[in-house]
Amino acid sequence: MQFFANTAWTADYITGLKTLETQSTKSISQLHDFRKLVFNYLKYYHSNSEFLSKHSSDLQNGEILKTTSDESPNYNKCIELFNNEMSIESNILLQLASAIDKFILDGITKYLKHHEPKIKKEITRLEEIYDQYIESSTKLKKLKNKYFDQLRLKEFAETQGHKIQEPQIQRHDEEIDYSDEESYADDEVEEIKTQKQNIEFKFPLHIGTTTFENEEELQQIIAQLITKTPTTKRKIPLPGYKADIFASGSLCEVLTKIRIKGLKPSRSNFEKFGQSLVDLKLITPTSIFQKKFKSEGVWFEWSDLADFVAENLPNSLDLPSTPIKTPSSSRSSDSTPHKVTSPSNKIMSDISETSTKFSAMFNSMKSTILKTNHDEVISTTLEDYNHLLLEVQELKYFLEMGYIELSKYLEKFEKMTIQIIYTNSARLSEIISNFHHEQIKQIDDFTKEMMSLNKQENHEHDFELKLNSLNSGLYFALTNENQLPQNLTNQFNIFNDIPLQLLNYQINEEDDQDILSIASVPVLLYNLIQTIETEKSDLKSLWLQPLNFQTAWTIKQEVTQLLANYIPNELDQLTSASDLQESFINEVIDFLQKKKSEEVVHFLKSWLLEIKDSVIPFIVFDSILKIYKDESQSTSDLIKILSSIPRSNLASLLCILEHISDVFKLGKFLEYGLSDELNEKLNEDEKLLEQVSEELNSMESIGSLPFLHLIMRPSTTKNSTGFKPPIHEYNSMLKDLLKLDTRKKLFNVLIEQETKYRQKKEAEKKAGIPTKKIHLPPPPSSSHISSPPSEKLQIKVTQDNEPQESDLATPLKPHPQNQELKTPRPLSADTFTLRPFKTRSTPVPSPQGSPKHQHKEFEQELSHRPRSSSNLGPKMDIKFEEPN
């Protein structure tokens, strides 16, 4: 078996010692790399643990769970599961990092802290012993040479005194030539070798945080530092020390200016750089007690080694291959002297060049040398030699014993290092494997729990919750363009409010036997429903299907183009507004009668959505909705509120409800539209009413709208940003509206209102009070087209304080035989003339910009007026026709 300690010996000792140092450094480096690997694993798992812990805390304390807890409990549960999973995995990762630190990293760190400084200290101690051994050996050789020199000098002195030559000593001199020049030259050679060993740098050389790749870089930087660092003279010269010294702060300033590669300008880096110069013996502290380099307050001097490195480092590491010339040999070859670059070689070169002077000096000192007490010197030298020889042998013993002990120690260290790396690698993999098994088990449990939540009912439930959380979504038709007439010349707008539409009784006003239940229904609405009912198609499916925006837009475009291009005959333009509207509506009805029932139904839906106000005005929307939100309310409250809306709106509502009841086979009135005797046909079923209400108000299809939204809408101003329909209340309300009892009561209210209105009209007619509006004929033009109604004067003379709805809503036809204005008494043409108001180009929206309507009795007004020429006529209610 080969031992580690037996393989590291070398003849010069130092090579084997360097080999042991290199091997130990490599093993220590391997341990550091392995420790770094383990630490990176620890850092990875610890960082992941912190990351998961932070995000788990953010989820717990953040807004995600708060915002979703009410909207989606299942989604909230998913987030909580992930939050718990992250928290558990964070704890597992933290435990894994703790296990790696406790069982692996801590042992490697302690092992390195114990052995690394010990190995380096022992190697440094042996290197110092070796240096002392070499130095002592060199001194021992010098003492040996000195001993023989003194013997020769003693013999020389005796020869000069007695003129006797000693053959034995001469023979000794012949065997060993100990001339002065040769001994001095040998000393210089030994000094050069010693200096070479002392300045042997290993490149790349690390000085502080800087790395020098070769000798040239080191020489260049040291030369710059010596040149640029300011020095000062010592106040008190000391033997053995240089006279020029410099402050550490000055050196730091120079380091800042020359910008050495890899040296960042900081106090810490400068102190590390200076300490490396001290350790390399390139600078020497001025105080023997100063061992550390500080950036200020410390004085240093450049060493001889630094001067030598700055001048000749690249060439000085190799000794000259030719022998160094002694003075005697130089005399024979003065023409080609050998140049030595070290300081000692320079001295020898100077001596060799001045051999004559040296010989003269040697001869002059010969007398002094001859006077030396040679016996005493020989005795002292011999004593020093013997003592130093024992020291050299002792140093050799210490070196060999230390070498053996170090090699044994390193052998154990190498074995333990290999064992540590393999053992801890296996332990690390085992810990990580156990962690992954535990992690996979935890993930399996987590996955099973998440799969239990991944169900279709949860998907639908969460989607429904999201729909319920939306504040908008129900379709409202933009009515900006519907505020403008489709026929600008005749100011006809098909999307006017229900009361402003042409009503049935207005085209049959001379017929006293008109049917009151449909008298106030708009002509367009009534005829559209009649057109739909004449078709033999599945009207139920047409009303239940979503609004087809493409079909509705197409029909609307065609109707708009038809109205824009339609030119009524001159008779309709000159008679009354009702005849003019009737001609336009007849064109639209004739056009729609040629279309399919599906297209007419979509146009009717679009028309109901786009009229300026819904059939049930928005002003009563909140009151009606409140009834169905308050369970204590009854159907009578709904009838009471609907009784307050205008007659035309109530008649339109009943017309639409009768049509829907007929389509869906609910209870209906058999004589509706033919007579006011409403004989009902009972076919009411509570479940059927609920089913029909839910089907009509269903929003399960894209584009579908609740039926109640077609006939009753809230204010668009208050709900411009979105409206969420209360479907439950809508279903209850539509169910009540479709009941026969409710419709019958509303019919009775409508017929009562219509009867009162006609009685009032009859009373006015018998009293001779004109109630009709007279249109002044437009000025003749080449086109024979009347000016817009907004430019026509409407004059009405009345003595009634209360304006009539029909009078304010739609102008009536003038009597065909009397186009003049009837007044309670004749007017004088000299005292009263009709003159129009002067209008501005842009009407003022303020109420002050419009004529005031005064509703006082004519006779009372005359009784309070002073008689004057300007007030001979009756009080006139004169206004412009309201723009549609």
Image (cartoon, grey):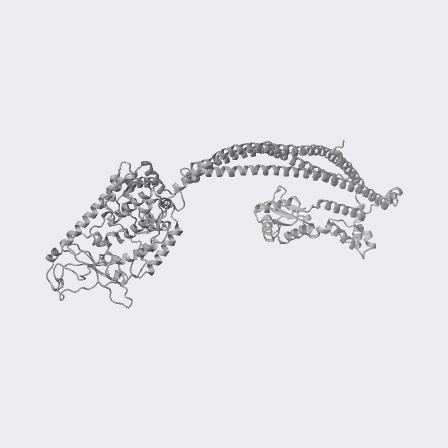
Q: Does residue 809 appear anywhere in the picture?
A: no
The quadrant the N terminus occupies is top right
Picture coordinates of residue 144 (x, y %)? 80, 41
Horizontal side of 148 relative to 634 (left or right) equals right
Q: How many marks?
A: 0
Q: Is residue 762 left or right of residue 613?
A: left
642 or 21: nearer the eye?
642
Image check: 732 left or right of 459? left
Q: In the rendering, at what x and y percent does residue 750 appear?
A: 23, 46
Q: Residue at x 24, y 64 (%)?
A: 778
Q: Nearer the viewer, residue 551 or 371?
A: 551
- Residue at the far right in the pictured view: 167
Spot occupied by residue 70 in the image (x, y as percentages of width and height): 40, 37
Q: Is residue 337 left or right of residue 101?
A: right
Q: Return the x and y of residue 705 as percentages of the image width and height.
A: 36, 45
Instruction: Using the image as rendered, state which of residue 303 and residue 500 is in the foreground.
Output: 500
Quarter of the image that includes the C terminus: bottom left
Q: Work out whether residue 221 can be spotted.
A: yes
- The residue lying toward the viewer, choosing from 48 and 473, is 473
